[in-house]
Amino acid sequence: MKEFDFPGSKTIALLFDPDKIQPGSLSNTLRIATECRTDFILAGGSITFNDIDDLIERIKSECSIPVVLFPGNLLQLSRKADIIMLLSLISGRNPELLIGSHVTAAPYLKRVREKLFPVGYILIGCGSKTSVEYISQTESIPSDKPEIVVATALAGEMLGLKMIYLEAGSGASMPVPHEIVKAVRENVTIPVAVGGGIRNSNEVETIYRAGADMIVLGNGCEKNPELLVEACRIRDSFRKTI
Ligand code: 1GP
């Protein structure tokens, strides 16, 4: 397998949910993503109407950006991605999402061990209830309780997870507060990814400044590709200062 510097420092990941892609716009978004050197494409979503394999094949046929599987459920398992996030929903107490699904998936994933990347997935309550909260049947951590987020992230690191993903939820009314990103960054040594509800360049800059390594932008970039272009420009300016 080709070695990817995953997640790297100051990266932008563009998330495609197979159920939310606008017909006809994927090619254009991928062209823009390539032009602005988007680091990763994430593929996944909360429910499954459309086949994840089809989406990954299409992305790979149209661009060479590494594809990262971001599976919302067992129907979204695929060995076609370059990297597979093995997500543990550590903010919740749903045993299926802490170990049950992993047991079911392990024999299937055994053949692609080199692609696996274990991630501590932490939901932060940022406004109204999100799809991921409802579908996972878990409660997010309130955004005014940074100490609980930090303790959860620390536990994830101590258990051997390789990245913490702070998730406000797709379409969240506001992103994860920068104070939370900063508190987690100061307490764990593994990379920190942040996603959900990021809609403008100020938010991208604030979240990077708070210490995020990876910023995840969702399908909103299809409607507003300028956000992706701006986010990559901000990433480049942060990289120059590292
Ligand atoms: C969701 O973090 C991602 O898992 C992206 O969210 O669609 O709100 O950008 P948005």
Image (cartoon, rainbow, N blue to C red):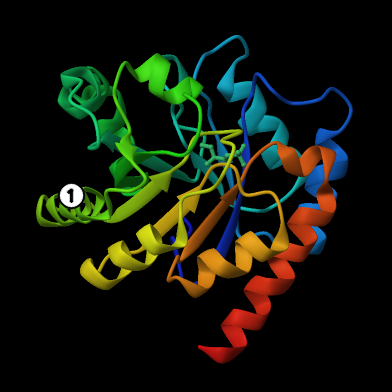
The residue at the far top in this view is: 49
Q: Quadrant of ligand 1?
A: top right
Q: Position of residue 241 (x, y in %)?
A: 56, 90
Which image quadrant is residue 143 in?
top left
Instruction: Answer yes or no: is residue 4 visible.
Output: no
Task: Please tell me how many numbered marks the rendered image carries.
Answer: 1
Q: Nearer the viewer, residue 120 or 6?
A: 120
User: With respect to residue 66, does 113 lie above or below?
Assistant: above
Tell which of 94 and 146 is nearer to you: 146
Relative height, residue 175 to residue 71 (above, below)? below
Task: Name the residue that disc number 1 marks.
Answer: 156
> Element type at marker 1?
helix
Q: Is residue 116 left or right of residue 147?
A: right
Q: Is residue 101 above or below residue 111?
A: above
Residue 191, above or below 41: below
The residue positioned 71% from the left and 62% from the top of the image is 201
Left or right side of 146 for 44: right
Left or right, 75 with reference to 189: right
- Local crowd size for mark 1, using a 10 Å CA cut-off: few (<14), some (14–19), many (≥20): many
| Residue drawn at 18 percent across, 49 percent down | 156
Nearer to us in this view, 40 or 194: 194
Q: Image point 30% across, 65% down: which residue?
A: 183
Residue at position x 69%, y 23% in the image: 20
- Residue furthest out toward the front: 144
Q: Percent position (x, y) of residue 199?
A: 69, 49
Q: Amino acid at mark 1?
A: Gly
x, y percent for residue 155: 12, 51
Whole-percent x, y for residue 19 in the image: 65, 18
Is residue 186 among what the camera can see?
yes
The residue sitting at the bottom extreme is: 241
